[in-house]
């Protein structure tokens, strides 16, 4: 798994590629914990390159969504592949974190 | 029957999943079915890694049962404390963000994405048997 974080004005985009599973989750948690030390309120997960997610990955997304809500921030996801979207749908998480087909739409949503 | 045995820890995950995916592929499952089989297998294995041996060292075995029909049955064996993961209640997938609890998703995926799933205790072994039909 690879994570590239970019900041455009006050929006942070975490582009996650590869596999988000029990092996790679600690890496994402560490990057997010660093980010949460800052007062940022707008966060997007760009999942165009994400091949695979398991419940270990979902757990991090749920924790992040709860933290963002606690700081009155905005979180959304962009460009989920079909098999990843499948996991979000079955788990009900698709209703908890807004998902958009394009990065532009996600950026508009957090503005 | 084809068996692969490895230490029950997260470092074994990718090798075990590669093995399972290859066995499923031999039976002609579609890519989307392979993704689901891999996900279910991870959930079953991680349960054993995290809970199976309560912090002590142990082994996990994956058995791929060969049969004439196009189904695939995977069994995950461990010698940890007796525990039936299917005894866990499903998470409330309708809950809103405030109410939604962390956890319980792995077993939920196992239930949802298998065609048959059963737990049994044989001697000192926990055995979780998961069957996928090739449609």
Image: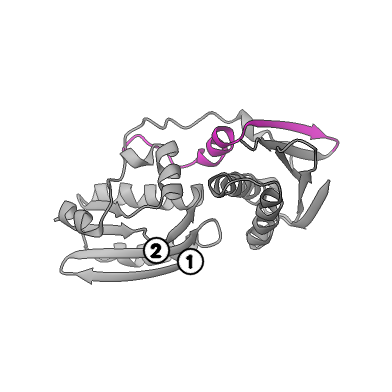
Residue B96 magenta: no
**Residue B128 seen in the current view:** yes
Numbered tag placed on residue B4 in the rendering: none
Instruction: Report the residue at 80% width, 37% height from top.
Output: B68
Label 1: few (<14), some (14–19) or many (≥20) C-alpha neighbours in 10 Å: some
Residue B121 magenta: yes
Disc 1: host chain: A
Label 2: few (<14), some (14–19) or many (≥20) C-alpha neighbours in 10 Å: many
> Could you say which is closer to the camera, residue B39 or residue B43?
B39
Image: magenta residue range: B97-123
Where does the image place residue A45, in percent across and percent down from the top left? Answer: 32, 58
Quick one: label 1 or label 2, which is nearer the N terminus?
1
Element at label 1: loop
Where does the image place residue B2, in percent across and percent down from the top left? Answer: 81, 50
The residue pinned by badge 2 equals A16
- Left or right of A11 on screen, residue B37: right
Circles 1, 2 touching at the beta carbon (< 8 Å)? yes
Instruction: Report the residue at 70% width, 56% height from top.
Output: B19
Disc 2: host chain: A
Q: Is residue B31 above or below residue A35?
A: above
Tell how many labels.
Answer: 2
Instruction: Report the residue at 66% width, 51% height from top.
Output: B25
Instruction: Report the residue at 65% width, 55% height from top.
Output: B17
Give the quadrant of the C terminus of chain B: top right
- Residue at far right of view: B123
Labels 1 and 2 positioned on one and the same chain? yes
**Residue B78 seen in the current view:** no
Numbered tag placed on residue A1 in the rendering: 1
Q: Is residue B36 above or below residue B108?
A: below
């Amino acid at each position: 798994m690879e994570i590239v974080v970019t900041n455009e004005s006050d929006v942070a985009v975490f582009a996650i590629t590869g596999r988000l599973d029990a092996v790679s989750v600690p890496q994402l948690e560490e990057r997010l914990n660093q980010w949460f030390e800052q007062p940022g309120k707008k966060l997007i997960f760009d999942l165009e390159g994400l091949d695979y997610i398991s419940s270990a990955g979902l757990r991090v997304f749920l924790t992040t969504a709860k933290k963002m809500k606690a700081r009155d921030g905005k979180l959304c996801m962009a460009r989920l592949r079909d098999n990843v979207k499948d996991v979000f749908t079955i788990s009900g998480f698709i209703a908890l974190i807004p998902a958009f087909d394009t990065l532009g739409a996600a950026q508009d949503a957090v503005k | 029957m084809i068996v692969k045995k490895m230490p029950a820890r997260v470092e074994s995950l990718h090798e075990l999943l590669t093995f399972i995916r290859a066995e499923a592929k031999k039976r002609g499952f579609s890519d989307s079915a392979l993704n689901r089989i891999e996900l279910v297998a991870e959930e079953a294995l991680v349960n054993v890694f995290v809970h199976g041996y309560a912090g002590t060292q142990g082994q996990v075995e994956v058995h791929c049962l060969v049969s004439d029909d196009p189904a695939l049955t995977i069994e995950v064996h461990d010698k940890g404390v007796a525990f039936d993961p299917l005894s866990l209640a499903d998470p409330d997938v309708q809950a809103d963000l405030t109410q939604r609890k962390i956890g319980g998703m792995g077993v939920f995926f196992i239930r949802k994405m298998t065609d048959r799933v059963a737990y049994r205790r044989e001697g000192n072994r926990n055995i979780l048997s998961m069957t996928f039909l090739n449609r």
